[in-house]
Amino acid sequence: MYANIPGRFIQPTWGSIRLSVGVLLLLSATSAWAASLSLRDAEAIALRQNPGLGALTQKIAELRHKAVAVAQLPDPHLALSAANLPLNSFSMNQQQMSMLSVGLSQTFPSFGKLGLEGQQAGIEAQAAADTLRGQSAELVLLLRRAWLQALYTENAMVTVRHQEQLEAESVQAALALYRSAQGSQAEVLRAQLARDNLANDISKLQAERASDLAQIAQILNLPEPPSIEKQWPNLPPPPTLAEMEARLSGQPLLRAAQAQTRAAQMGVQVAKTGYWPDVTVSVGYGQDFYPGSPNWLSAGVNLSLPIFPGDRQDQDVAAAQARAQQAQYRYDDQHLALTQQARAAFARYESYKIQLQRMDRQLLPTARNAFSATLAAYSAGRAGLNTVLRTQKEVLDYALNRLQYRRDLAISAAELDFLTAQGEMQP
């Protein structure tokens, strides 16, 4: 960089150059970090772009409009007619009683039916809204599972590559013994084979990572797999089991099932209104064109006659009662299923937490110390290569198991968060 100041020419110093390079590196790192997608942002994208949630949102709008429409009176009927028109001349003033008439009629459904149907449609709209919240929470859970699996495969590849370094140490130890005539060429080849075989494990993990990222892209409705953050997300710790069971009644899917039960029970009351007649009130005006004849006014009331309830009204009520009982059974079954799911997920969460703590404090450090001691003994000629390779494999197995426990612990926490959701998940 050169700065032009009147009368002066300033040569850049090494300090300013180092500062500029540092700023550029910082900006580059910041841009790369910004390009990585966080789990929170991914959840927002999933809730905003998922087509299934969009369809359900429109279903809610449909039911809310329907709740207004079904509570209204039927449209009135307008009647236009020509009465007693002679066919020989079609003259309106040739005979008495020839007239043109206009009439208006309005049907009133049985008492209380419209209000009950409006309430039923409103409850169905509320059930759809709870279903939307529940499916939103399910979508977030599906995303979190795929996300955590992708993080597991990413960290597993790092672990296997670290294991390659341990295998390289074994190869160097075998070569040193072979060159000093204390080991055999077969041991060198076996150590190299164990190291090179890890390349297959890495290839397998790379394929699994690509599959996980493709699933994330499908959930987010993205054309290409995203670049995700490599750090493990901080999911909220679950409440106690007693608190979880107490909060299950507020779970959106369970609330939706409860609302569907109320709507079905309201349907029984709607069916019972069928025992009462529908009433149609009509009024008409007729114009008589025969000289000296008056005009005419007519009015009437028309009633439906539900005189055979055994074949119609009783059957409608029985069918509505069966639907209400069916909805109640579905609610009870879903409540039991969610309760069992919560208990099982909580037990898994506690188990994985204990196993992860034991792995971090005891098993994995002991396995690493055992490998170091075995490798040192092999280098001194006091242990065989088989022991070294076995302890190396144990370190890898324990490290991968630790990652599995961490993944499964986070998945269990995500499941418990879904089960205790209270409807805050919305697109």
Image: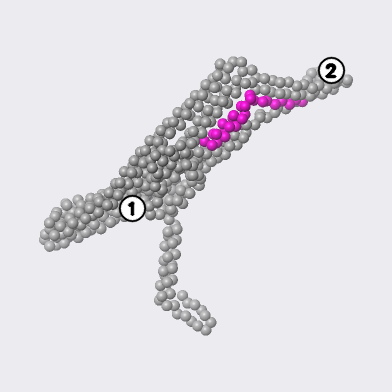
Image spot of residue 206 (x, y percent): 34, 51
Image spot of residue 63 (x, y percent): 57, 36
- Estimate the spatial distance between the alpha carbons at disc 2 and disc 1, rounded to whole Å: 100 Å
Image spot of residue 89 (x, y percent): 82, 20
Q: Which residues are magenta?
A: 102-127
Q: Amino acid at mark 1?
A: Asn
Q: Are marks 2 and 1 in contact (CB under 8 Å)?
A: no
Label 2 residue SS: loop
Q: Nearer the viewer, residue 29 or 239?
A: 239
For the rendered model, the colour scheme is: one colour
Q: How many marks?
A: 2
Residue bearing the label numbered 2? 96
Looking at the rendered image, the disc whose residue lies closer to the viewer, 2 or 1, is: 1
Q: Nearer the viewer, residue 17 or 41?
A: 41
Q: Nearer the viewer, residue 238 or 377?
A: 238
Residue bearing the label numbered 1? 155
Label 1 crowding class (10 Å Cα cut-off): few <14, some 14-19, many 20+? some
**Quadrant position of residue 121:** top right
User: Is 22 situated above or below 282?
Assistant: below
Image position of 287 (left or right of 18): right
Of the two numbered discs 2 and 1 on the same chain, state the one appearing first in sequence.
2
Image spot of residue 310 (x, y percent): 56, 16
Q: Is residue 77 magenta?
A: no
Point out the residue furthest to the left here: 181
Query: Residue at the location (48% across, 44% down)?
Result: 425
Q: Nearer the viewer, residue 138 or 416?
A: 416
**Quadrant position of residue 314:** top right
Label 2 crowding class (10 Å Cα cut-off): few <14, some 14-19, many 20+? some
